[in-house]
Image (cartoon, helix red, strand yellow):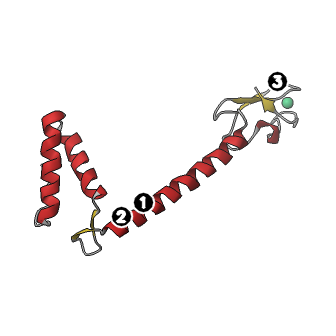
Amino acid sequence: MPQVSDGPKELNDLLESVYSECMKKIKNETKCSKIAWGAASNAGWHKDKDGNWKKKSDAEIREDELIKKAGIRRNRRGAGRMGGNRAGAGPGGKCICPSCKTEVDHQVGMPCYSVKCPKCGAQMTRK
Ligand SMILES: [Zn+2]
């Protein structure tokens, strides 16, 4: 059972109740420990810099959620840009020289048209 030795009773009670509820349904100790700790963290439980378990106030939890949401939005925009750069060419694959047919491995982040053929120096294209 997930418990914090010498931890706050409120935290241990929460861990115990979530864990035992979960064990009734899933009967998987690893999974239920994880779920119990997840519930504790959602409720704002965390270790402070001195190693003591503290519960965040509702205001602090809301603030964290706002920061988290803003971060996710930022990441999504970034991924969108990267997808645009790839323009249908997935990672891996080969580039081929249109004049001598030499093939080289495609480098991620380096489009084939920016690669010169190692044999004849022609601009390569994606195979
Ligand atoms: Zn070539």
Contact? badges 2 and 1 (CB < 8 Å): yes
Residue pictured at 25% horizontal, 75% vertical: 50
86 left or right of 73? Answer: right
Quick one: SS at disc 3?
Answer: loop
Locate residue 127: give its quadrant: top right
Query: Which amino acid does the dot numbered 1 rest on?
Result: Glu
88 left or right of 9? Answer: right
Q: Position of residue 35 (x, y in %)?
A: 25, 46
Quick one: SS at disc 1?
Answer: helix
Q: Position of residue 40 (x, y in %)?
A: 24, 56
Q: Do we see residue 27 in this rendering?
A: no
Q: Which residue is mark 3?
A: 101
Contact? badges 3 and 2 (CB < 8 Å): no
28 left or right of 105? Answer: left
Residue 96 drawn above or below residue 12: above
Q: Do we see residue 84 in this rendering?
A: yes
Q: Which residue is mark 2?
A: 61
Q: Which residue is mark 1?
A: 65
